[in-house]
Amino acid sequence: MMDQPSMRELVDAVREFLETKAMPELKGHTAFHARVAANALAIVVRELERGGKSAEEETARLRGLLARDGTLEELNRELCKRIRTGAFTSATPGLVEHLEKTTRDKVAIDQPAYSGFKLATERGA
């Protein structure tokens, strides 16, 4: 029986091909688009590695903050509603910490080389 390659292995193989074989041969807009594609695949890999855990942690924080159950989408909508109506402010216990942690988790997946993220990570924020 042959094992199938994992999603991560497939994405890594395509990204490696783009970076090591295709991009050195390309010029202009085509090279730019290949670089964009390779970056998008790197985001997919980070999402596969961290996305599930980040979503679980965000959901748990929201359930505690909102004192209710629901899906991540439902809880985020409720959080937005409470912020919009003024029911939650920066003085609401746990809100700022939740927003900071959620933002760091999302940036870690989308733009881990972002200088502000690196600085925040080094400071332990």
Image (cartoon, rainbow, N blue to C red):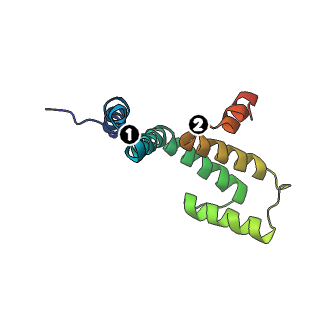
Left or right: 73 as drawn, with respect to 7: right
Nearer to me, 52 or 105: 105
* Labels 1, 2: front one: 1
Pick whichever of labels 1 and 2 is earlier in the sequence.
Answer: 1
The amino acid at mark 1 is Lys
Residue for point 72% across, 32% down? 119
Q: Residue at x 79, y 62 (%)?
A: 88
Question: On the image, numbered disc 1 is attached to which residue?
Answer: 27
Residue drawn at x 61%, y 43% as measured from the top left = 107
Label 2 belongs to which residue? 112
* C-beta proximity under 8 Å, tags 1 and 2: no
What residue occupies the far front of the structure in this picture?
A: 28
Tell me the kind of residue under disc 2. Answer: Pro
Which quadrant holds residue 85? Answer: bottom right
Residue 64: x, y in percent? 69, 53
Name the image quarter holding residue 18: top left
Label 1 secondary element: loop
Picture coordinates of residue 75 (x, y %)? 62, 61
Q: Could you tell me which secondary element the residue under label 2 belongs to? A: loop
